[in-house]
Amino acid sequence: MKHTAAPQPGYRVVSLRQLAAGGRWRTEAMRSYGQPLLYWFTRGQGRITVQGVTRGWGPHNAVYLPGDTMHGFEVTGTVGGYALHFTQGDAATLPDSALHLRLRDAASQGEMNIQVENIRREIELGDAASARALANHASLLGVWMDRHAETALDAAADPPRAAESLTEAYVALVERHYREGRSVASYAARLGVTATHLSRCCKQTSGRTASGLLHDRVTFEARRLLGETDLPVKEVAQRLGFTSAAYFTRAFQARSGLTPTGFRRRK
């Protein structure tokens, strides 16, 4: 297996049912991607946490996330829909901030389905003109989302409360520094609050403590490195800021129920 530091960028359309079948950690664990991402939920319901703030999702919800946006979503029952991965080059024509669009009318739902299908078919076609066609599809989708965001009845459009603002700032810091082995107390100090207050705000907005969000992000990356690369466990530990492989093994087992070696064998 070839060493891989991060997933390769590029257009992809992944079935949410297929993604959820890989285990709860594939959807619920906090993670981010370097490229823009759109979740188009056509069936099911649950909760999605974006930048530390949790809200409900249901059928015909579109959740757009710029690159490096930390998130995870829970599924209740069966889920249907797609995850659309774009390229870094699309960031300039897609929205600048996260959006949660609840499409209530059949016309808007149909338009979104057509756009997703057009992108999926172009990826399958994969001819010499596909890169240009996909960039144009992404640009048109960006305009479409911007127009709907202006009139969307979405709680995310309300001015953020103090707890949400603090949690979002914390999650943004975690996404930048989670590989450095920092404690919650160090993040809290950086934000000018106590660790207790920070954890209380995180619990209020996301249902998870500050340490839970941090450990969730680190554990997801550990699972990814163990499952997608052949890096030695010691190097995985080092990349995630652990002082020793033994400490990493104990922490990973506490969160996942398996040792790093056991998780890798199961894969």
Image (tube, rainbow, N blue to C red):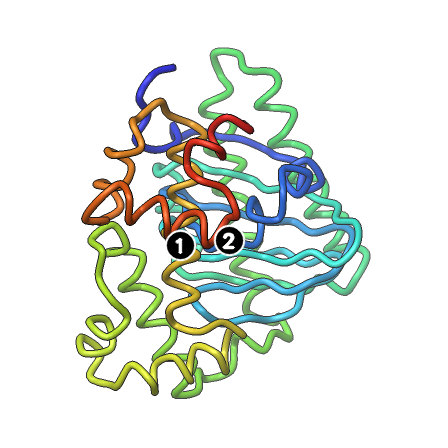
Q: Nearer the viewer, residue 120 or 7?
A: 7
Specify few, some or many for label 2: CA neighbours under 10 Å numbering under 14, 14-19, or 20 or more: many
Label of residue 170 in the image = none
Q: Where is mark 2, residue-wise? A: 29
Amino acid type for the residue under numbered disc 2: Ala
* Label 1: which secondary element: helix
Rendered view: 166 above or below 30: below
Specify few, some or many for label 1: CA neighbours under 10 Å numbering under 14, 14-19, or 20 or more: many
- Give coordinates of residue 26: x percent, y percent: 56, 44
- Give coordinates of residue 162: x percent, y percent: 39, 88
Quadrant into which the N terminus falls: top left
In the orientation shown, which residue stands out farthest toward the top? 128
Which residue corresponds to the image point at 26% horizontal and 41% vertical from the top-left? 245
Amino acid type for the residue under numbered disc 1: Arg
Which residue corresponds to the image point at 76% horizontal and 65% vertical from the top-left? 104
Q: Quadrant of residue 209?
A: bottom left
- Give coordinates of residue 23: x percent, y percent: 63, 42
Of pointers 1 and 2, the one earlier in the residue sequence: 2
| Side of 36 where 19 appears, left or right | right
Rounded to the nearest whole Å, what is the CA distance between mark 1 and mark 2? 7 Å
Q: Nearer the viewer, residue 133 or 103?
A: 103
Which residue corresponds to the image point at 31% horizontal and 46% vertical from the top-left? 248
- Give coordinates of residue 16: x percent, y percent: 67, 42
Q: Quadrant of residue 131?
A: top left
Q: Nearer the viewer, residue 214 or 112?
A: 214
Rendered view: 95 above or below 153: above
Which residue corresponds to the image point at 59% horizontal and 42% vertical from the top-left? 83
Q: Where is mark 1, residue-wise? A: 217
Question: Badges 1 and 2: C-beta atoms under 8 Å apart?
Answer: yes
